[in-house]
Image (tube, rainbow, N blue to C red):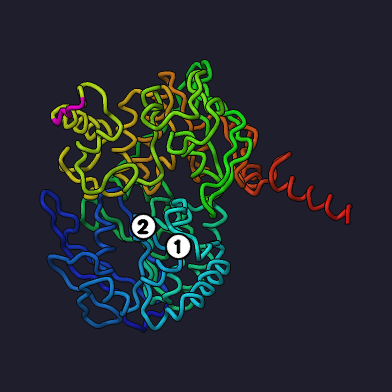
Amino acid sequence: MTSQLPPRLALAHISKRYPGVVANDDVSLSVAPGEIHAVLGENGAGKSTLMKIIFGAVRPDAGEVHFNGAPVSIGSPHDARNLGIAMVFQHFSLFDTLTVTENIALGLPAAQQGNMKQLAERIRATAERYGLPLEPNRHVHTLSVGERQRVEIVRALLASPQLLILDEPTSVLTPQAVETLFVTLRQLAAEGTSILYISHKLDEIRALCHHATVMRMGKVTGVCDPRQETAASLSRLMIGGEPPREARVAAQRGSVRLSVQGLSLPRAHAFATELSQVALDVHAGEIVGIAGVSGNGQQELLAALSGEDTRADATSVQLDGKPAGRLDARQRRRAGLAFVPEERLGRGAVPGMSLATNILLSHQTPPYVRQGMISPGAASGLASAVINRFRVKASGPHALARSLSGGNLQKFIVGREIESGPRVLIVAQPTWGVDVGAAAQIHNEILALKATGCAILVVSEELDELFAICDRLHVIAKGRLSPSLPTETATREQVGLWMSGLWPGGPAQAHAQAGMEVASHG
């Protein structure tokens, strides 16, 4: 970092108010050229709003912005890009019906686009260089959350920004991909790029960032060098106290509630992953986890288990011993299955609807719906109960889903599903982009549900999360599922190897065996 130069970015007394909430209250911070600067805070602390102000997606009510020493007015993302500012949003800004190349072209200045074929090659080369593999001609609606995250990051990197804003960039990346990304970010910083980094992963911030600004309730409450702090001290700075502790609870393992046997599905589209002979059991009073690199069949497996994809044989998926492979999502809910999808906005919740209305996505029985008639009072009452129990920061049950921070919306969706009292709960990425306190709360609620005898399947790319709450682990690779491992005897190294398909009889071993047979016949 070069101290003789003016700050790359300087914010002075930024304020932004919404009805019923002050998102940013007299916020000031400074980022030097080549500095990696963290912004820390709980969900709803105002971090994302501040980043959107810098990127021109939100206009501040008060305050000044200086870029490279000069005052600027950033009225739109277009203005920000022209200044040399790029941003990776926590909630992705991608068009589902367009390809990866088309989406990236929309985010680049015309001078940097070239023709689409040339851009596709640049995307492929950049993605490979930074260890973020992408298929440029694939449509976004076929991508998993982790793959969409890669699109956002590669788009930002292609812009060669002077200031790169990253809002929870590693929330759905594997540990290997995170390490590769960090190498990239350190290289960019060494070349003079400034980076604003938002993450709830305190170990990442301690390893990567030079400085940190801590926010609470919309205000700056401290500035520190995270390299000189512990994860515990950073957590205390964020929440003003000790975070809730996660407590494992004893539960009696009962009968098999969810059984998958010989589940094989052909690709639903050209870029999908074929599922091959997937088998697993989840017992009452048990939490089973599935680890894996994004794009290895998680999306397809979740669709087959939730009832979104009903092409499987009826007996390949069973709920409480009864065939469920051909049941749709509503029928499976009636059989006692609850589901938290990996995509919060658009699948887990309808952005433009209130929290009370979103309750009805999974509560369609009395007292919420009677003989086809909705009871707004009952839905509002349950929404209020979820908000209170899960400490969701929202103005009330009539707040729009899109008005909540990512972590608070996640708490609401998880709470909505738990309140249904399921016999089987399937959760994808339960704490994606959630702060340390909220993550502990969600984990504790899942563990408490286990104690009631619910069978729980957790699909996550967070190994720490899986080791913290699961009794057994599977790994998915290339559409095949590994044998299960007791969490207490599994190691991260073993799980990491299995994520490449390197378990006995796994896809990597089968591929190598096939190659040897071809060579011997040659």
Give the extent of the magenta segment.
Answer: 372-376
Instruction: Give left or right: position of 497 versus 410.
Output: right
Q: Residue type at mark 1?
A: Val
Q: Is residue 407 above or below residue 11?
A: above
Residue drawn at (41%, 75%) of the image: 159
Q: Residues within 10 Å of mark 2 (few under 14, many from 20)?
A: some
Q: Is 340 colored magenta in this rendering?
A: no
Asked if residue 41 is positioned above or below residue 98 in the image, the reply reads above
Residue 69 vs residue 412, the one in the foreground:
412
Tag of residue 105? none
Compare residues 474 and 54 and report the one nearer the observer. 474
Give the structural element (helix, strand or loop) at label 1: helix
Where is mark 2, residue-wise? 92
Based on the displayed image, in which of its 4 quarters is residue 198 positioned?
Answer: bottom left
Residue 30 visible to the viewer: yes
Query: Which of the two discs, 1 and 2, labels the residue nearer the N terminus?
Result: 2
The amino acid type of the residue labelled 2 equals Phe
Q: Which mark is residue 151?
A: 1
Residue 55, position in %: x, y? 28, 69
Number of marks present in the image shown:
2
Label 1 – label 2 distance at C-alpha: 9 Å
